[in-house]
Image (cartoon, helix red, strand yellow):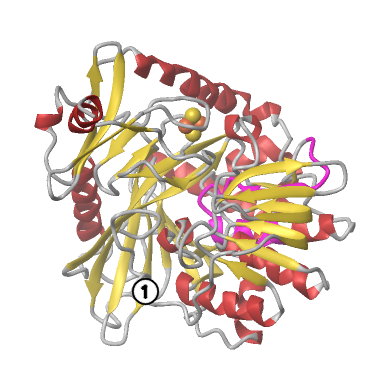
Amino acid sequence: MNSSGYTTSVWMDVSPSSEFPALQKNIDCDVCIIGAGIAGLTTAYQLAQEGKSVVVIDKNPLVSQGETSRSTAQLTYFTDYPYSQLQRFHGKDIRLIRESHQYGMDTIEQIAREHGIDCDFRRVPVFLFAPRDKDVKTIDQEQEILQGMGVEVLRHHRIPVAGLPDYPCMEVQELAQIHVLKYMYGLAEAVKGLGVQIYCSTRAVSIDEREDDVLVQTENGQSIRCTDLVTATNSPISETLGVHLKQAAFRTYVVGLKVEKGALPYALFWDTLDPYHYVRLVEMPDHDILIAGGEDHHTGRNEDGGETEERFRCLTEWTRKTFPQTGELLYEWSGQVMESVDGIGYNGRHADDKHVYIITGDTGSGTTNATLGARIVTDQIMGRDNPWSELYRPSRVTLRAADQLIKEGSLAFWQFKDYVTPGEADATANIPAGAGAVIREGLQKVAVYKDENGQVHRMSPVCTHVGCIVHWNEVERSWDCPCHGSRFDSYGKVMNGPAISDLEKLETKQEKNAAGSR
Ligand code: FES
């Protein structure tokens, strides 16, 4: 099991060239960054270039083992929201959205070039196609808005690739793709070369902002005293609610199928369905792999009743039908996306804190949001103006997104109903080996995991963030919280924030009996 789940993504056969030790002593620095994903390492890179002493800590044993390793690494200036909706939320500031994500793309290319990071960076076009007649107007609207921002848009009466369906389509050029872990491991080396201290297997368990500094305590008892703190942990662990009421966690699914070299062009392909499908090719020495994502749903919830195996089956079926060039199914994995209510990230100084900064709310464009977020945070720490600070301000409330806000807020509230519903299984005996379920025992609920040897592990199903009831994720073998997306491994250890603490362990019947007979 990788630190972010049980399945394996197409990137994970590449290993980092350096392993980083766990923190063993108390230290002081200018800036402490929690999270060694793209956001954390890019912020470290930029601050170190400004002469700051920087420490990066990550709870995982290796860098980039969080959601970074599960992305499809498409670099674009599009988010999961169409520009027509972004325009409704942000008006003329959509130009800044495009400009800032363009910065993200260009910066990744520049860092890769400067440091000789061989990460398969490639400029590619995107084809946005409408499988249903009624969605053609979505493409019309996107085209008009993009052209209004000076983007060249090509229209095709069908996807201009031999063998693909004759769906109406628009094309935008000069987007990009990378091998995300090759990039991340190269970036970690560049960051190390700038003198940044990176510590893995080092989990932050508390953050205390004081008058002049911030104190971070780690699970192993060390402390880091810093002037500024950046939480770059996919979902911020630096606060209880706040931004968590303005973004929702979604699970998204990806399949990878073998394709003969040359059978399809290197390009991004998206459709206009909801949830939409997103597709790209990955270069391998002897063949290519087409990876297709979609089938999204709220983390810890199953609103449409779809079983997760069924989601992979549907996705594979859609992929084979849309891309008949695809062959053997090689990969199935899932990942987590934080969807903000107004379609863009929350990046910058955190609401009331003078010295705490966050980068989150990727909304389907995590790689570029992380990179532009790093720029905003670096500029703020250095006391400089940044043209995108106001747009991405974490404390903003976008009134035109109020309907979304109410929907996500009520979702969290509604989840407290799980305290009174029946369990997911009748009894521990009904849980197969390698699986888990929440069962009801009288007035209480218990999360039960039965390992491959049949040994039972019991824990409280109450999420340690603010107390919703977790659900079993059969694909990634994790406990997922439906309220704000915290995730815990089979044994209850935190994988994803905002929770900081593990699920509380409960005794098994045998342990209780043994304790009673002592
Ligand atoms: Fe907020 Fe679980 S993530 S209650």
Depicted 244 relative to depicted 279: above or below:
above
Asked whether residue 123 is in view, the answer is no
Q: Position of residue 319 (x, y in %)?
A: 25, 58
Q: Is residue 366 magenta?
A: yes
Depicted 103 relative to depicted 494: above or below:
below
- 366 left or right of 129 in image: right
Q: Is residue 477 magenta?
A: no
Q: Nearer the viewer, residue 396 or 516?
A: 516
Magenta span: 352-375
Q: Position of residue 368 (x, y in %)?
A: 60, 61
Q: Position of residue 402 (x, y in %)?
A: 63, 24
Asked whether residue 124 is in view, the answer is yes
Depicted 437 relative to depicted 348: above or below:
above
Q: Picture quarter containing residue 482?
A: top left
- 353 left or right of 68 in image: right
The quarter in which the C terminus is drawn is top left
The secondary element bearing badge 1 is classed as strand
Going 33% across and 12% down the picture, which residue do you hit?
A: 420
Callout 1: few (<14), some (14-19), or many (20+) C-alpha neighbours within 10 Å? many
Going 62% across and 85% down the picture, which residue do you hit?
A: 113
Q: Which residue is mark 1?
A: 282
Q: Position of residue 41 (x, y in %)?
A: 62, 66
**Circle 1: residue type:** Val
